[in-house]
Amino acid sequence: MALKIRTFFLYVSISIVSFTATYHLLSPTVSDQLRRRPPVYFPNPRLRPYASKNHIINEQDTITSQPSNDVESETLQVHIPVNNDSMRVFRRPDLSIANVSVLFPSWEALVIVPNDVVFDSNYTTPSSLFCLFDTDEISPARFTGTMSFPDRNTYTCPLPKRVLRRLPFRQPVLTKTPVQSIQPVQPAPELFRWNFIVYEIVETDNDVVLLAKGINNRQGVNRSPTEFKCLFGDDIVNGVTTSVTSSVQEVFRCQRPELTEFGQNLVRVSLLIVQNKQVVPSLAYYTPQRKIAIGGTKSLLCACTMVYNVAKFLKEWVIYHSKIGVDKFILYDNGSDDDLGEVVDLLKSKGYDVETRFWLWPKTQEGGFSHAVLHAKTACRWMMFIDVDEFVYSPSWASSKPSKSLLHSLLPANLYGQLIIRCYEFGPSNQTTHPLAGVTQGYTCRKEIENRHKSIVLLDAVHESLLNVIHHFKLKDGYKSKKANIGTVVVNHYKFQAWPEFKAKFRRRVSAYVVDWTRSVNLKSNDRAPGLGYLAVEPKGWEERFCEVFDNRLKHLTRRWFGSRKGPSEFGMIWQNI
């Protein structure tokens, strides 16, 4: 009997081992990949700063070709001014492009190259590029836009399966051919991690502002500015440091440096953590002569929002708000791959002032709004921070004609620096697809109690720290906020739309301090859909949810302002016809 039991357990053990080995070889699962991956949103203790090891080739670098003793063909040497141990040597230099790469939370490599890269006659467009990883795997490089100051082209490449299983994650080589013909002699540097990086810079008249991930990770908990220095240059020995005067959220304000020895050349700028002399990796460059451009006459009221694939919604939102008082629209594009650019160009051709800004950085809503305050100060007096699925409405407009004075009359005077407007959240209203006439026409049933708020901010009243939370800002001493009566003005937030539209919210939450919906934490947060959970699976009866009060007021108003009859039984809105 005992022998039979031992034989049985031995058989089961061998079966489990065999199955596990076969399973891992042939079908790696998501859970397996997640188990092997380091955390994405917190600095990795294994990650060494490569601030001087991922240098973008520019005018200060030299590229030479020279023979090699062990390679029959010529090789390309990229000489880094400060740290030569990051030099990489490749066969076939005509097929490789020097780059710096960042690992994004979506398990893509953001590859950044100088925009003056010359493509030969066989590769006339950037679409003919690929990423070659150190596992000899290739993935296509998708052009995602151009960074500014200095201008650099960006591409995203999905990380292949075997790359996900190998630590550390190393930078790919951007190539002009899918043939695996590039052979690095030395290992590539590690990928920059998106959770620990300086990603933007704004130069004002008085200081330099850096936006950085991975320093102040907890909402409301900010490290002292005395813990940091701003470093101008590639390393501590040859660079110049200045004091950090403010450290709040992702915003770090630095004193301007004296850089006479650098002349007018571009200088890498980063944060130095004083305690351990660690340099935060950086994509930001400083140039002494560059400041925010000063425009002409200021617009009284502008609107700013972060967008991703909102082409189908944009015309309705812009046309409506431009008619009630918004003069200029500023869109921070978070990597859209729909027809957003074409729609923006169309609106511009019709006389609407719409500006898009490249903003590929994930989970940076607070940093993006801080960036907008600094950049828009010279062009706008007041800024309205709302999303493309949100429409400002006042019941008092029911008998009015569209006029810019409708919003302008709501702006507070004297010592008020911010108008707080509460939100009504609308449900799917029995819609199963996007309503062709627009969200104001299709979604007419909402929750009874208002939730959250949005704001219109006087830019000159925003506190120097640029602190902002859920669309409102901390104000300078002497200014105060005014909360609008919900019977006077409200934001109609078409939050819970038809399921094909709503599930896009699972892609990523834009706030740095709001958990992505795909993570099974904070399930009772007000940011989430009640009872939905963390999977993008349509719940039964979704189209009837969140319907407590029928509210047709904005629907009727917009039909009167923007609607027209096309025939005996057909009615259309103006945004459907442009």
Image: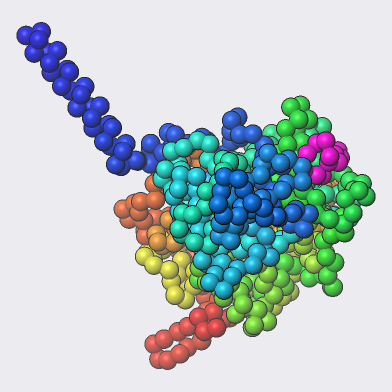
Q: How is the image coloured?
A: rainbow
Q: Nearer the viewer, residue 458 or 88?
A: 88
The residue at 57%/45% (across/down) is 70
The residue at 64%/83% (across/down) is 350
Q: Nearer the viewer, residue 408 or 208?
A: 208
Q: How many marks do you count on the picture?
A: 0
Specify the quadrant that holds the C terminus: bottom right
Is 551 placed left or right of 459 in the picture?
left
Is 147 placed left or right of 378 in the picture?
left
Is residue 517 inside the magenta stretch? Answer: no
Q: Residue furthest top?
A: 2
Is 486 placed left or right of 567 in the picture?
right
The residue at 80%/41% (across/down) is 231
Q: Position of residue 234 (x, y in %)?
A: 77, 43
Is residue 240 inside the magenta stretch? Answer: yes
Q: Position of residue 200 (x, y in %)?
A: 71, 51
Q: Is any atom of residue 466 visible in this view?
A: no
